[in-house]
Image (tube, rainbow, N blue to C red):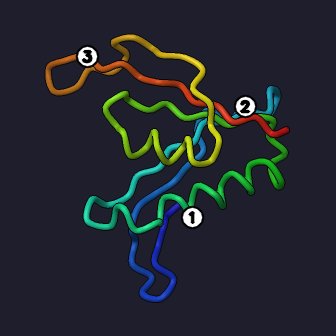
Amino acid sequence: MVIADNKTNKSLGIIDLFDFNPQHKRAGIGVLIIENEQHKGYASEALSLLIDYSFNQLNLHQIFANITTDNKNSIQLFKKYNFTKIGVKKEWIYTQGKFKDEVLFQLLNT
């Protein structure tokens, strides 16, 4: 889904559900905001709306996010919404000539 400014209709980023599994009632969440539009609350608002939609409309039991350990802004964002760190995938992402660890965060619909 596109994250847009309601007044200007300008695209600011995207948020999506991936690995949707209706049998196990779970999906992953990914969010990306254009660099010069970050730190303005757009990702936070979009994440809040998608959590609500995932639990109340799609009836999911859990949602998760995979975040590289160096992405402090995303880690802070998901922690703000009570996602819990449940594991680390060591050297999971290969980028710019090196491997990065990836943290798995989870939020249960309780």
Q: Secondary structure at mark 2?
A: strand
- Residue pointed to by mark 2: 21
- Disc 2 crowd, CA 10 A, few/some/many (<14, 14-19, 20+): few
Mark 1–mark 2 CB contact (< 8 Å): no
Q: Earlier in the sequence, mark 3 or mark 1?
A: 1
**Residue type, label 2:** Asn
- Residue pointed to by mark 1: 45
Give the image location of residue 93, x and y in percent: 33, 21
Give the image location of residue 107, x and y in percent: 69, 36
Q: Secondary structure at mark 3?
A: strand
Q: Earlier in the sequence, mark 3 or mark 2?
A: 2
**Residue type, label 3:** Phe
User: Which of the image's four quarters has the C terminus?
Assistant: top right
Give the foreground label among 3 and 2: 3
Give the foreground label among 3 and 1: 1
Give the image location of residue 34, x and y in percent: 31, 61
Tell me: residue 7, above or below residue 44: below
- Disc 1 crowd, CA 10 A, few/some/many (<14, 14-19, 20+): few
User: Which of the image's four quarters has the N terminus?
Assistant: bottom right
Q: Earlier in the sequence, mark 1 or mark 2?
A: 2
**Residue type, label 1:** Glu
In front here: 58 or 82?
A: 82
Tell me: residue 84, above or below residue 57: above
- Residue pointed to by mark 3: 99
Q: Residue at x 48, y 66 (%)?
A: 3
In front here: 29 or 44?
A: 44
On the picture, is 99 further left or further right than 89?
left
